[in-house]
Each structure stands twice: as C-alpha cells, then as structure tokens.
Image: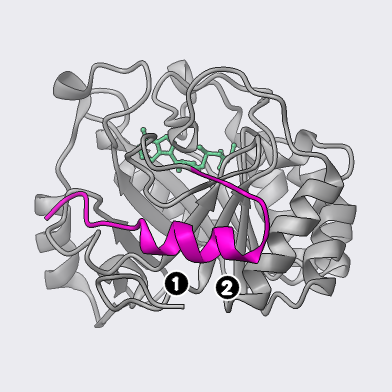
Amino acid sequence: MKCRQGNTIDHLRISVTQDCNLSCPYCHREGEEGDQKEMSFDEIRRIVKAATDSGMKKIKITGGEPLIRKDIVEIVKMIKKCGAEEISMTTNGTLLWKYANELKNAGLDRVNVGCDSVTSGMLQKSLQHVKKGLLAAKTAGFDPVKINMVVMKDINHHEIPAMIEVAKETGCMLQLIELIEIGQLDYEKHYFSLDGIEEELSRKAQAVNVRNMQNRKQFNLGEVTVELVRPSNMHFCAACNKMRVTSNGKLKPCFMRDDNLVEFKDINSIKKAVEAKEVYYD
Ligand code: SAM
C-alpha cells in the first residue's frame, strides 16, 4: 500500500499499553496524550491481521512498556500467526532478562533497548539491570540488539563515548536518537544536534550505510555500528514508511499529529489511514 508520497507503507508500530514501570521525563509516549483504555488481545489481533493483509508485514511492538503486559508473549505469537515477516520490540530493558528466551521462541526477531546513560542519574535505570537484559537478548539469539540512546544536552550528551563502549562490550548496535519535542523536558534547553557526531563518525567509519527507513545513516566503526536517528533531518518524513496504532486502537498516520487519527473498523480503515499520511517536517 503506497502513501501520497509514493512510499510503500510496510511497517506497523503498535503501542500495546500506555503503562510503564519508569517515568522518563523526556518520554514522547509514542505521541499519545492522556490515559486511555488499552486494547484487548482480540482488538490487537484484528488490527494486526488487517495490517498484514494490507502488506504491512514488519511490526514493531511498543508502549508504554510492552513487557509489563501479562499477555505479551501470546501477543508476539499471535502477530506471527497473522503473517508478520518481521516482529520487533522496543523496551526499556528492565524486564528483558526475564522474557528474552520466551520472546525469541514466540517469534520476536529483533529488540531495541532504551538505555540513555551509564551513570543513570535522572534517567532512572540501573545499567547493570539493563546490561543483564542486553546479554540475555544476545544469548537468546537476537541480532542485532539495538541500544536506543536519546541524546540530551547537559544530561547525557557527554556519555556517547561511554555508551559506544557499552555497545561494544555487549555486542549490540548503538542508536543515537535526537530528542523529539514531546515530553516534559525543556526542549530548547536539552535538544542536542547530532551534526558534530555525524561528522566525527563519518571521519572514523570504515563504511557508511543509508537505510531506507527514514534515511538513517549507519556508521560501521569496526567493532561496533552506530546508527543516527534524526527526526529533524530534512528527508526523515519524506522517507516515512510507517503506520502507527495507539494503545487504545486508533490508526495514527503521523507521530507528530493527533488530528488525523482513524478509528479502526475493518481493512478499509487501514487504507484510509495510509491516504491521510502527509509530510510533517519538510
Ligand atoms: N518503554 C519502551 C522503551 O523504552 O523503548 C517503549 C516506548 S519508548 C516511547 C520507545 C522509544 O522512544 C525509546 O526507546 C526511546 O528511544 C524513544 N524516545 C522516547 N522519548 C523520546 C523523545 N522525546 N525523543 C526521541 N526519542 C524518544
């Protein structure tokens, strides 16, 4: 299914809960406001089936924190049965050590683990706990395991080299993500442009790969790969190939907007939501 920009929309990013066991101040909550009733297992199944039948075969599970849903392993199995070709999850990593094997056996292909700091501080998580999860994911056979680091000025921007070391040590890939202006954090104060890092990585890299997914650049540094996620980059939206689903079951064509949500009724709702996609940052 193609959007008006001509992109094939083959990725579905579905939030299975708004609840989280952390409350990171910068969290964009997948662009969701308020506290909504979360989808039942059957509602998720109906939407995922319609999406896979429409060609969206790459499914990312997000939240809130997906691993606090008690039926998360069953959800992964069900998504697989719906015909997904690739299932991935983004998690804060705190419970990953417990679930890594079960998730792999259920059909999860890839995992991204949010981890923004080696010292923790205001970012709340214990690196030791998350490291245990990263290693459990590697042992379970996930490859790549990506560490998501949202880079914030005067909070953790100085920790990029240390996070590169964590990625090397655990055999993971590091994703450096520019802060998006949603969340409780003062954006003007803490936005950190990755321009300088991109220049430095370009100088050091043995190879640079540009992904179809939002034109993200991947820098191969030999022992470790670093990927940059730059939402303010000129071509980020133009290359968008995603549809989103909110935790209460609405189709969300654009992360940045709430005024064009589409109520899910049947497979035609997917088509309507794809038609509603527009470039936000141009
Ligand atoms: N709890 C899960 C987690 O931590 O991955 C899933 C939800 S979280 C909203 C998904 C990802 O969004 C996080 O890993 C983080 O990298 C990213 N993220 C959260 N807030 C952000 C912000 N303000 N700007 C950019 N990325 C953000």
- Read off the magenta span: 262-282
For residue 155, side relative to residue 280 (left or right): right
* Three-letter amino acid code of the residue under disc 2: Met
- Provide residue 157's location: percent of width, then percent of height: 26, 35
Corner quadrant of residue 87: bottom right
- The residue identified by callout 1 is 9
Count of labels in the image: 2
Residue for point 34% across, 58% down: 277
Tell me residue 115's x, y (percent). Answer: 51, 40
Of residue 165 and residue 97, the one placed in the foreground of this image is 97
Name the one closer to the observer, 265 or 71.
265
In the image, 107 versus 50, the foreground residue is 50
Residue 179: x and y in percent read 28, 37
Badge 1 marks a residue whose secondary structure is: loop
Residue at mark 2: 56
Q: How is the image coloured?
A: one colour
Q: Tell me whether the residue at label 2 lies in contact with that at label 1, contact meaning CB atoms closer than 8 angstroms.
A: yes
Nearer the N terminus, badge 2 or badge 1?
Answer: 1
* Residue at image point 28% right, 78% down: 6
